[in-house]
Image (cartoon, helix red, strand yellow):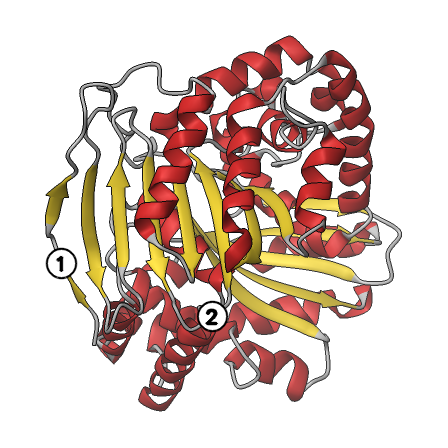
């Protein structure tokens, strides 16, 4: 069993080097699963999890910035910047960056979300110093040259086109807009063709300087690693770049958001000549800090989280109306979404929506059976553990936890929270969430009469 520990040790330092504060957040067993955190004087946080039984390590840097932080005119800037940090620094060209990791068989990538961005590399444990040096160099020393902005613009426009060619992906962006409207959470992470074309190198540089200060960053590393060595290497890389401009700076607090307005009963349709109609039916969900999120996870799993879930059984197994049908939740700092996705033939869309709506209404009124809840608890516990059995997943967990919650939770504590969910907890959250009037987003080749009838699904 792992346990939390609040032991704090202050590292001695010379006059030239300010003191770093180190904590053991989770004390593992025989050193396995120990999570430690060091906060450097410049406000940079470094969190590690030790797993001596593997031969790999994943190193990542999380930035406290996402598409939610963009104005309408800057929509897409966060993702654009993610691309540009791979284009070169004073020390390395774009080819040097990619070749360095390729030469040791490593993997390097990044992703942008609505409330954060992450850059990471996965390598053999012996090559971790190289990964740290390359990723830190990218984050602190990007040049963001005019010519690189122009070249990468074409790649991003192609990425937008690729997403629009995948209606099963695009419908989720449409649903976010249906729920949030022209709010930052309702706009696409990639931006639009117009906003991407309007972004200039100067505007992106200002965005970079504002949001990539060490106080906005969390370094996360997991695998066969030594915490103190990681701290020394990261500190050296940031000091070399002159990133610590304010030694007494404090890390930025987790995002608390502002109360985002969400709609209900809204329908948005996008006509496309596709073979299937792609549908998302959903309603407001829970913020990621809501204490009911564990019960919501059980509810989501029972409704549409697997082959034994209600929606899968009713829509696919019993009637064969869709190949893919599932439910999902998205939690943000101050709000969330719950949605049901299905892809089906256009002629079947009304039947699919009717069945989904009936199931949601029934669960809102009557709840789930004890057997369904027990099965969902077991499935969620198992998937939680199995999803954390590689260094990349561990790095994601500790990095996101520090950035979004400001604390760490051991796997044992997570499993205990899931196991503690009661049938009454699930029924209560089902009434609160599923009892709301839903909204609907559809992409497909719908005729006028079909489109008119779709409003009945949310009535």
Quadrant in the picture for the N terminus: bottom left
Residue placed at 24% from the left, 49% from the top?
Answer: 407
Up-down: is 424 above or below 189? Answer: below
**Sequence order check: which comes first, mark 1 or mark 2?**
1
Mark 1 residue element: loop
Q: Position of residue 120 (x, y in %)?
A: 54, 46
How far across and down, in percent of the image, does residue 238 sit? 42, 27
| Crowdedness near tag 2: few (<14), some (14–19) or many (≥20) residues, C-alpha within 10 Å | some
Q: Secondary structure at mark 2?
A: loop
Q: Residue 346 in the image: state x and y as whole percent.
A: 80, 64
Q: CA distance from mark 1 to mark 2?
A: 24 Å
Q: Is residue 263 visible?
A: no
Task: Give the quarter of the image for residue 246.
Answer: top left
Mark 1 in CB contact with mark 2 (< 8 angstroms): no
Image: 54 above or below 83: below
Please report the residue visible at 41 percent of the width from the left and 80 percent of the height from the top: 382
Mark drawn on residue 63: none
Residue 201, quarter of the rendered image: top right
- The residue to which callout 2 is attached is 54
Question: Is 161 positioned to the left or the right of 436 in the image?
Answer: right
Of the two numbered discs 1 and 2 in the rendering, the one whose residue sits closer to the viewer? 2
User: Who's the residue at 84% across and 54% down the image?
Assistant: 445
Q: Residues within 10 Å of mark 1 (few under 14, many from 20)?
A: some
Q: Can you identify the residue that label 1 sits on? A: 5
In terms of depth relative to the viewer, which is nearer, 349 or 21? Answer: 21
Q: Nearer the viewer, residue 70 or 212?
A: 212
Q: Position of residue 76 (x, y in %)?
A: 63, 28
Residue at image position (31%, 88%) is 370
Quadrant hosting residue 341: bottom right
């Amino acid at each position: 069993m792992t346990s939390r520990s609040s032991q704090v040790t202050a590292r001695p330092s010379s006059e030239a080097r300010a003191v770093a504060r180190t904590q053991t957040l989770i004390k593992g067993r025989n050193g396995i699963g120990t999570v430690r955190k060091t906060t450097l004087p410049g406000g940079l946080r470094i969190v590690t999890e030790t797993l001596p039984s593997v031969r790999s390590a994943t190193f990542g840097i999380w930035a406290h910035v996402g598409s939610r932080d963009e104005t309408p005119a800057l929509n897409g800037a966060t993702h654009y910047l993610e691309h540009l940090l791979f284009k070169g620094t004073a020390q390395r060209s774009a080819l040097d960056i990619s070749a360095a990791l390729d030469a040791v068989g490593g993997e390097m990538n990044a992703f942008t979300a609505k409330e954060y961005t992450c850059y990471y590399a996965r390598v053999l444990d012996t090559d971790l110093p190289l990964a740290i040096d390359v990723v830190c160099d990218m984050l602190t020393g990007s040049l963001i040259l005019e010519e690189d902005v122009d070249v990468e613009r074409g790649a991003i426009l192609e990425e937008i086109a690729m997403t629009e060619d995948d209606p099963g992906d695009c419908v989720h962006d449409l649903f976010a807009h249906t729920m949030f409207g022209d709010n930052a959470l309702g706009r696409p992470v990639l931006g639009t063709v117009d906003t991407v074309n309007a972004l200039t190198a100067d505007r992106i540089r200002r965005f970079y300087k504002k949001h990539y200060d060490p106080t906005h960053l969390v370094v996360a590393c997991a695998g066969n690693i030594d915490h103190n060595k990681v701290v020394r290497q990261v500190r050296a890389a940031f000091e070399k770049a002159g990133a610590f401009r304010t030694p007494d700076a404090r890390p930025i607090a987790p995002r608390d958001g502002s109360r985002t307005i969400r709609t209900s009963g809204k329908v948005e349709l996008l006509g496309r000549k596709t073979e299937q109609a792609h549908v998302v039916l959903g309603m407001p969900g829970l913020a990621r800090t809501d204490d009911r999120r564990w019960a919501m996870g059980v509810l989501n799993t029972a409704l549409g989280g697997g082959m034994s879930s209600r929606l899968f059984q009713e829509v696919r197994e019993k009637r064969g109306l869709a190949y893919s049908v599932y439910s999902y939740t998205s939690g943000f700092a101050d709000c969330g979404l719950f949605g049901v996705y299905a892809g089906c033939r256009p002629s079947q869309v009304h039947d699919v929506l009717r069945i989904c709506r009936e199931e949601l209404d029934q669960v809102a009124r009557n709840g789930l059976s004890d057997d369904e809840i027990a099965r969902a608890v077991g499935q969620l516990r198992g998937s939680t553990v199995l999803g954390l059995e590689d260094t990349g997943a561990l790095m994601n967990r500790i990095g996101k936890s520090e950035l979004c919650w400001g604390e760490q939770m051991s796997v044992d504590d997570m499993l205990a929270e899931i196991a503690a969910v009661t049938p009454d907890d699930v029924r209560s959250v089902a009434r609160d969430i599923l009892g709301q009037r839903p909204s609907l987003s559809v992409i497909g080749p719908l005729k006028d009469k079909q489109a008119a009838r779709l409003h009945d699904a949310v009535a």
